[in-house]
Amino acid sequence: MHRSIVTAIGMTLLAPAAGAAPMNIIFYGNSFTGSGGGVQHLVRDIATAAGHETPHIYARVVGGQTLEYHLITGTGWITSQIPDGEHWDAVVMQEHSTRTTSHPMDGNIPAFFAAAQGLYQAVQDHSPDARAVLFETWARQPDNAVYPTIWPSASDMQAEVRMSYDQANALLNDQGTSTVAPVGDAFEAGDFDRSLYSGDLYHASDTGALLISLVLYGTIYEDPTLADIDLASVGTNLDLTDEDRAFAVALAESVLVPAPASTATLATLGLTATRRRRPDRANSTPSHRAP
């Protein structure tokens, strides 16, 4: 099931008000976080375009690596990348895309859980009230060679990814406050459309990078009203058409809050997306290995 972040009323009450102090957000990930030149930069620009104070973004992005790698090598970075006296508001964690699955060589779900818990604890040791945001990755495009050898379909791979992130989310909510950014669900809502992927059929295209960033922004800021944001100044280095932007917005909104407007937008684009609601989870040296 796709996961709506919180109810519309909850978002109105919990979302940081535009004009509030800028957030400090730390990202851990690999080349999936590096999509579009860095989704952390796109998230920053979307937040600014939405009327928030421009957040302070810090990202540790190492190609092909896992959260375990970041836990082993990058916890000291938590204190060195933030001014004295300030705290982290959120830590975004993106795991290697097959580690959260049953992949025969790269899958290691217990290691994902342990690393996510360890990294979150390291952030909490500095900033006790920081929120964990689990950046759910996406299944490889349906024409990728992993199908049907390893998984029957992209939806089967995505189901494994989703389950692992949901389980990790439950563990992190025992430590503090955690939620899942349902990026992979947004790819699935678009039927894993080829336009969301680069030529290797697993990294994101520019359209995919915008989609990722919109879902992350909407999750971090608890803001489902993406269609109201003027994206003209966002991702100016990306090769995007107005239709690409509309597609990304519609898919992102469809997994943040199942709103009729999102359905209408998808229909206008000649696409369909089945609304699959999810329970509220808001409380509940670079390698060349593929991410």
Image: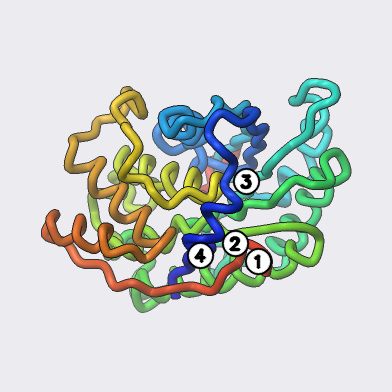
The residue that mark 4 highlights is: 7
Of the residues shown, which amino acid type is indicated by label 2?
Arg
Give the mark nearest the N terminus, 3 or 2. 3
The answer to whether the residues at label 1 and label 2 have Cβ atoms under 8 Å apart is yes
Q: Amino acid at mark 1?
A: Asn
Between disc 1 and disc 2, whose residue precedes? Answer: 2
Quarter where residue 114 is shown: bottom right
Q: Choose mark 1 or mark 4, whichever is in front.
A: 4
User: Regarding mark 2 in the picture, which secondary structure is present there?
Assistant: loop
In this view, which residue lies farthest toward the right?
125
Is there CB contact under 8 Å for labels 3 and 1? no
As drawn, is 281 to the left or to the right of 270? right
Q: Residues within 10 Å of mark 2 (few under 14, many from 20)?
A: many
Q: Are marks 4 and 2 in contact (CB under 8 Å)?
A: no
Q: Which residue is mark 3?
A: 92
Looking at marks 3 and 1 on the same chain, the residue that comes earlier in the sequence is marked by 3
Count residues near mark 4 (Cα–Cα under 10 Å), then give few for <14, some for 14-19, many for 20+: some
Q: How is the image coloured?
A: rainbow
- State which quarter of the image contains the N terminus: bottom left
Of callouts 1 and 4, the N-terminal one = 4
Q: Position of residue 118 (x, y in %)?
A: 80, 53
Q: Earlier in the sequence, mark 4 or mark 3?
A: 4
**In 3D space, how far apart are the residues under numbered discs 1 and 2 (Cα atoms)?**
5 Å
| Residue linked to disc 1 | 108
Q: Residue at x 61, y 55 (%)?
A: 134
Give the image location of residue 126, x and y in percent.
86, 38
Q: Which residue is mark 2?
A: 99
How many angstroms separate mark 4 from mark 3 (CA)?
22 Å
Residue at disc 3, secondary structure: strand
Q: Amino acid at mark 4?
A: Thr
